[in-house]
Amino acid sequence: MDAAKWHARLLTGHWYSHLPATLQDSLLANARLRHLTAGQYLFKRGDPPCGLYAVLEGTVRISAVSEQGKEAVLSLVELPHWFGEISVFDGLPRTHDACAVGPCTLLQVPQPAMLQILEEHPRYWRDMALLMSQKLRLTFINIEQLSLMPASVRVAHRLLMIAEGYGEIEQARRMLQLPQEDLAAMLSLSRQTTNALLKDLQSQGIVRLGYGEIEILDVQRLREAAHA
């Protein structure tokens, strides 16, 4: 594994870049590379804990499917995001499915290695808690928006969050690999409603719609549309 190469990529993320250097080194020293093909599951709801993951290349869809087959998409995880920390804390089965949208490369710090690091250095639990609290903060924001905000604001806000890497990256992405059906599933909206709202943003010159992708043309106006 080319640890130095992946270390440089992971440093573009807020959480990893603010870790103690010793914890960064421990994560990389205990990590192994995982490669997924399009549509391959990393884990499914109910699977036993398998450690902490970081996305190096590609996109992972975090979702849940009801007994009726309806899918709720929580997020699309890209470089430099880390995920899977809930099961590190409680040791319970996975809460959601994680599936590769396309070819993916990930780092995996296996559960036993992760727990060994934390047992030897209990102060690192705070860093893990910060990773989980960031996700919890975003969850509360999304619940509030679902209850209080009109659909147009929710669409703009979610696009802005994805473009800004959910607070993990400094420079907002301009090109989002984001099918409209996934965006609709994230927001509990119909595909038709989502498409209409996106076309309205496109008519205003804020975004450009492509096949399976959305280009952000004006981040500031998107921020205004999101009331952010």
Image (cartoon, rainbow, N blue to C red):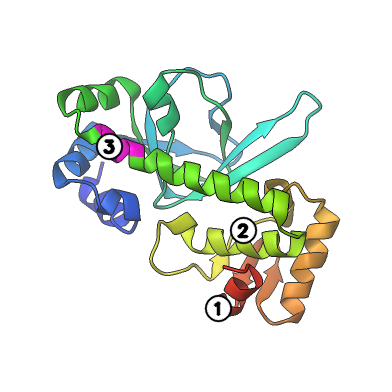
Give me the C-alpha separation between circle 3 and circle 1.
34 Å
Q: Nearer the viewer, residue 122 or 96?
A: 122
The correct choice, above or below, for 75 with respect to 168 in the image is above
Which residue was labeled with disc 2? 158
The residue range painted magenta reads: 125-129
Q: Quadrant of the N terminus?
A: top left
Give me the C-alpha separation between circle 2 and circle 1.
14 Å
> Which sits earlier in the primary sequence, circle 2 or circle 3?
3
> Which sits earlier in the primary sequence, circle 2 or circle 1?
2
**Is the residue marked by circle 1 packed among few (<14), some (14-19), or many (20+) residues within 10 Å?**
few
Mark 3 or mark 1, which is nearer to you?
Answer: 3
The correct choice, above or below, for 190 with respect to 62 in the image is below
Q: Image point 25% across, 52% down: which residue?
A: 18
Q: Quadrant of the C terminus?
A: bottom right
Left or right, residue 59 beside residue 88: right
Within the magenta stretch, is there residue 16?
no
